[in-house]
Image: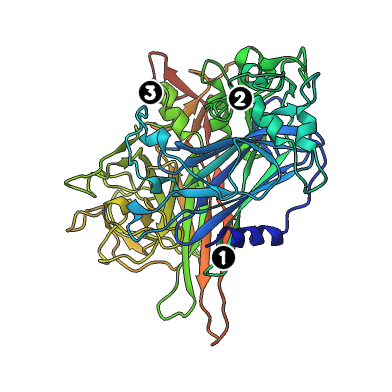
Amino acid sequence: MSLNLYRNLFRHLSLAALGLACALPSHAVHINPDGRGQVLIYPYYTVNAGKATLVTLINSRDSAKAVRVRFRESRNGVEVMAFNIYLAPFDVWTGAVFSSSDATDYAQAGPARLASTDNSCTTPRLPSSGQDFYRFDYAGPFSADAGPDQLSRTREGFIEVLELGRIENVEGFAAADAIRRGAPGGPRGCDLLSRAWTSNVSSGLSVGVWSNQPGLGVLSPDGGLEGSAIIVDVALGSSFSVPTVALDGFFVPAADCAPDCRGRGDENLHAGPGEAYPSLADARNGEDGRAVAEFPPGGRAQHMNFTGPDAGLKAVSAVLMRQHLDNTFQQSAAGQSLVARSEWVVTFPTKHLHLAQSTPEQRLPFRSAYGWAAQSPNWPNAGLSGACEPLSVDYGDREGRRVNRNAEGVEFGIPPPPPPAPALCHASQVIRINDSVSPASEGERLYEALRGDSTSALFGSAHALRLRTCTGRKRLRLAPNGRFNNCVSGDFTEGWMRLELGEPQRNYLYSALQPDASQAGSTNLLLGLPAIGFAVSEFEGSDTPGVLANFSTLQEHAGERASRAGQLDAANPAGGWTPVSGD
C-alpha cells in the first residue's frame, strides 16, 4: 500500500478536541483517568496481517514541548525506533507505521516503517519516504539480546512517549520560536533544532549547543500530552482505536525551583534522541531521589514509597500492577456466515527494564530471563522463547456457565503444571482465542512463526499464545504429539475470560521488607505483574447478499490490584513472603 494512501487517511481522521483544562500537580506517579499526562504508553502497534498503525500525539498546553517517542519490539521490549519531537503549543503530530515489504516466509518479511507528512520538528529528521525500523539494539555486535535477529521482529510492539521538558527562548538561541515558526501548516525552523544536536561545533551558539548543554532553554515538564493509535486494515475496510495509558506525576521538579526550574539542567529530562535516557525507569517525584506511586485499590487512594537506584522503575510498575485481567471474546459458531474472531493483547511496558537489573530482587515482579533457541530438538515441548511467567485462566459463557473441571483437586483456573503450560512470555503478548489450527489436535501453547507455526489470524502475531475456551477440561495432560491439551469438549463461542497473572509467592513487587507498623492497614506488597492491554473482536461477512458487514470492536482490559502486608527476608527478598497478621 502506498504512502499516499496513509496520507489521505490522516486527512480524513477526526482528531479529538484539545482539552485545555490544567490538572493540579501531583507528587506521585499515577494513571490519569482523563487520558493526559507526562508519559503515554501505547499498548500495541502492528504492521502484520495487512494492517497499519496510525499514531497521534497532542500537546494540549500553551507552551512548546520536547518529547521522546520510542518504539519497542514485542519480544523483549528492545528499542527499534526513537526520536525527539518538538511540539508547538496545541500542536498535533501524526505518523503512519506500515510494512516496508511483506513475504510468505515471516522470517523474510521487511521491517516496520514510519512515515509522517507532519510539519512538527523531529530530530533526527524523518525522510519523506519514511524510515525503516532498525535492529542494531538486538542484532548488533554489542547487543546482549538472545535473539531472534530478523528485521521482521520490528513488525509488532508497543510505544512509549515521555515529555522531556518545555522549551523557551534564551539569549542567542531562540528554540521556542523555531518550534512555532511559520504560518499554520507552514514550515518551521527545524534546521536550528537539528544543528543544536550537532556534535561538532563550527560556529555560533546554536550549533551543537544541546550536545553540550541539553538543558539550555528547557523548563521542567508539566504534562498535558494526549494520544491515540488507530490500527487500520484497508483491505478489510475495518479499523479500531487503541487508547493510551497516561501517567502523570512522573517527574516533579525540586521544591526550591518549581515549577519551571529555569537554568537548572538537572530538573528536566531533555536528552539527545540516540540516548537510552530517559526511560520509564526515570520517574522522580520525591526528595532525595524517592519515587512515590499512587493507585486506587478498592476505591481509595494508596501510596507506596520507593527508594534506591531503581525507585523510579518500581514506582511506574506499581501503578501498572494487576493480579487479574478480565475481558470478553467472540467466535463464530458453526454454520454462521458472519465470521467472528477475538484476540487479546497483554503488554508489560516495564518488563525489559526489570530483566536488565542485576539481582533477583531488583528484577521482581518478573522472574524468568529472556531466552531464544533458533532450533530446539524437542520444540514445542521446551518452549524456549521469551521470558515466561505463569498464567492461570478462568472463563465462561454469556449465560454464566463456567468451564466444567473434571479433575480432582483442581483449583481456580488452569493450575500451573509442568511445561509447556500457558504462559505469558513476551513484552507484548498476543493471545489467540479458539482460532483454527491444523491439525486440530494442536494444543494451547506459544505458536512461533520463525519455527514454522502459523501467525495469529487477527493481528498476524509471530509469537502468539493460543488458548481455548472449551466447555470441559480434565486433569492437565500432554496430547500424544507432546502439545498441552486437556480439553474434553467443544468451546464456548462467546463470553468472558479472566487471566490471573503470575503466582502470589513468585510474582510480587515490594516497597519495604515489612509494612509500616505505625500506620493501620499499611501494605508493602503488590501481587501480579505490571500489565496493560485490550481485546479486539473482528467481524467479517453478512447474511445479506451484496452487503459488506466488516467491523471491529476494542475493549480495554478490566483489572484488579492486590496489595498485601507481608514480611520478607532481608537476606533474600525474592524468596517469597509471609502474611502479616491482619492481612
Say whether residue 481 is left or right of residue 62.
left
Find numbered disc 2 in the image and state the secondary structure of the residue it sits on. loop
Circle on res. 552: 1
What residue sits right under mark 3 in the picture? 360
The picture places residue 22, in percent across and down from the top left corner, at: 81, 36
Q: Earlier in the sequence, mark 3 or mark 1?
A: 3
Residue 286's quadrant in the figure?
A: top right
Tell me what residue is drawn at x 45 percent, y 20 percent: 567
The three-letter amino acid code for the residue at tag 2 is Thr
Q: Where in the figure is residue 329, as x and y percent of width and height?
A: 49, 62
Looking at the picture, does residue 112 appear above or below residue 285? below
Q: Please indicate whether residue 409 sits to the left or right of residue 392 in the image.
A: left
Location of residue 260 with respect to 119 vertically, above or below: above
**In the rendered image, which quarter is residue 385 located in?**
top left
Q: How many marks?
A: 3
Q: Secondary structure at mark 3?
A: helix
Task: Where is residue 307? Give x, y as percent.
Answer: 56, 16
Q: Residue at x 58, y 45 (%)?
A: 127
Q: Tell which tag, 1 or 2, sits nearer the viewer.
A: 2
Q: Identify which amino acid the numbered label 1 is placed on.
A: Ser
First along the sequence among labels 2 and 3: 2
Crowdedness near tag 1: few (<14), some (14–19) or many (≥20) residues, C-alpha within 10 Å: some
Q: CA distance from mark 2 to mark 3?
A: 40 Å
Specify whether 545 is left or right of 263.
left
Identity, as a three-letter code, of the amino acid under mark 3: Pro
Please name the residue shown 64% across and 21% down the image: 208
